[in-house]
Image: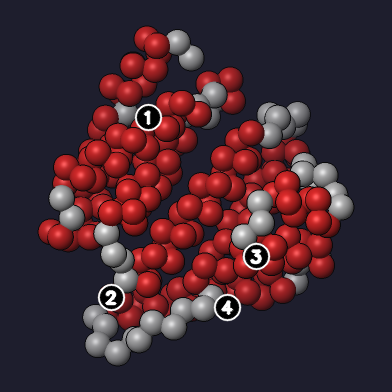
Amino acid sequence: MDRTDRDQLARENMPLVERTVAAMRRRFGPGVEPDDLRSFAMMGLARALDRYDPSRKVPFGAYAEHTIRGAIYDGLAESSWFPRRLMRQITFYRRADDMLRHAADLPVPGDTVESAHRLADTLKELAAAYVTTYAADGDNEEGVSPAEADEIVDRKRLCRNLQAYVAALPHKQRQVIQLYFYENLNLPEICERLGFHKSW
């Protein structure tokens, strides 16, 4: 992508940056400076522009939204203290970003069936990331608002369902989840330890 195309994409996606900043501001309240959020979001936009591959035929806005949000979480995590619940959310976004970047590096699928299988695999990985991030939820649940209580109930229900799903995975897939999320190995290290190719 040449400089002109990059600048054009950046200009076209400034409303996405502003919407994301506004949503994060509502989420975190007045304790977070909007200029800090905007700065982190711009770093995320720049990162998305660096990584974007137009030949994949994915709309840039869809690709960039996750990276912008993740950059805001990263920036806030590095500059502030967060409650454990929020740190888990940041951890999930980081893991999801890593997995989606890996998926984006794979060759473009040859047909619809392969695309569907790859999407299913990516969703399984994201579900596993969610479970392993939120399963050990030990927050004190006293004194929460009704909206927070609903969120806690929904999250626990989802965690139970996802834990059951992960438990039903084949042994090798469960091993990958264990090594990746609990032992913090990267994909090449996991492949070396388990003896199979990274594309698996």
Q: Nearer the viewer, mark 4 or mark 3?
A: 3
Q: Residue at x 60, y 35 (%)?
A: 104
Q: From the viewer's perspective, is 52 left or right of 11?
A: right
Rate crowding at label 2 as few (under 14), some (14 to 19) or many (20 or more) other CA atoms within 10 Å: few
What is the number of the mark on residue 183? Answer: 3
Quarter holding residue 5: top left
What is the number of the mark on residue 147? Answer: 2
Give the mark, 3 or 1, whose residue is nearer the N terminus.
1
User: On the image, numbered disc 4 is attached to which residue?
Assistant: 160
- Work out whether 57 lies above or below 71: above
Give the mark, 4 or 1, whose residue is nearer the N terminus.
1
Give the mark, 4 or 2, whose residue is nearer the N terminus.
2
Q: Residue at x 68, y 34 (%)?
A: 106
**Helix, strand or loop at disc 4?**
helix
**Helix, strand or loop at disc 2?**
helix
Give the mark, 2 or 1, whose residue is nearer the N terminus.
1
User: On the image, numbered disc 1 is attached to which residue?
Assistant: 46
Residue type at numbered disc 4: Arg
- Work out whether 64 lies above or below 6: below
**Helix, strand or loop at disc 3?**
loop
**Helix, strand or loop at disc 1?**
helix
